[in-house]
Image: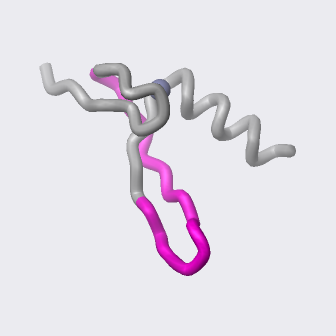
Amino acid sequence: MKEYTCFHCEHQVTSVHPVTFYEQENENDQLLCDHCYSEWLESLKG
Ligand SMILES: [Zn+2]
């Protein structure tokens, strides 16, 4: 099974979510694990 490295916590996981961070004018595509992805979604809500 393929493993990925979470961009945020750097854990090896088999389930990731692609997200795009915007840093100034650059789009930065990264992968987040389930946990970090849910926290990222929460941070978007404010
Ligand atoms: Zn993570």
- Number of callouts: 0
Residue closer to the observer: 12 or 34:
12
* Residue sitting at x 46%, y 26%: 9
| Nearest the eye: 17 or 29 | 29
Q: Residue at x 44, y 62 (%)?
A: 28
Q: If the image is split into quadrants, where does the C terminus sit?
A: top right
Q: Residue furthest bottom?
A: 25
Q: Horizontal and vertical percent for residue 16?
A: 38, 32
Q: Is residue 37 above or below residue 31?
A: above
What main secondary structure does the magenta stretch of the protein show? strand
Residue at far left of view: 1
Residue found at x 41% / y 38%: 7
Looking at the image, residue 2 sits to the left or right of residue 21; the answer is left
| Magenta-highlighted residues | 14-28
Identify the image's colour scheme: rainbow, by chain, secondary structure or one colour: one colour
Q: Quadrant of the N terminus?
A: top left
When asked about the image quadrant of residue 31, the answer is: top left
Q: Is residue 7 above or below residue 28?
A: above
22 within the magenta span: yes
Picture coordinates of residue 12, whole percent (x, y): 29, 20
Q: Quadrant of residue 45?
A: top right
Q: Percent x, y for residue 20?
A: 50, 58
**Horizontal placement of 10 versus 26: left or right?**
left
Query: Considering depth in this image, is 38 or 11 the residue closer to the camera?
Result: 11
Give the left or right position of residue 12, taking residue 7 as reference: left
Residue visible at 21% across and 25% down in the picture: 3
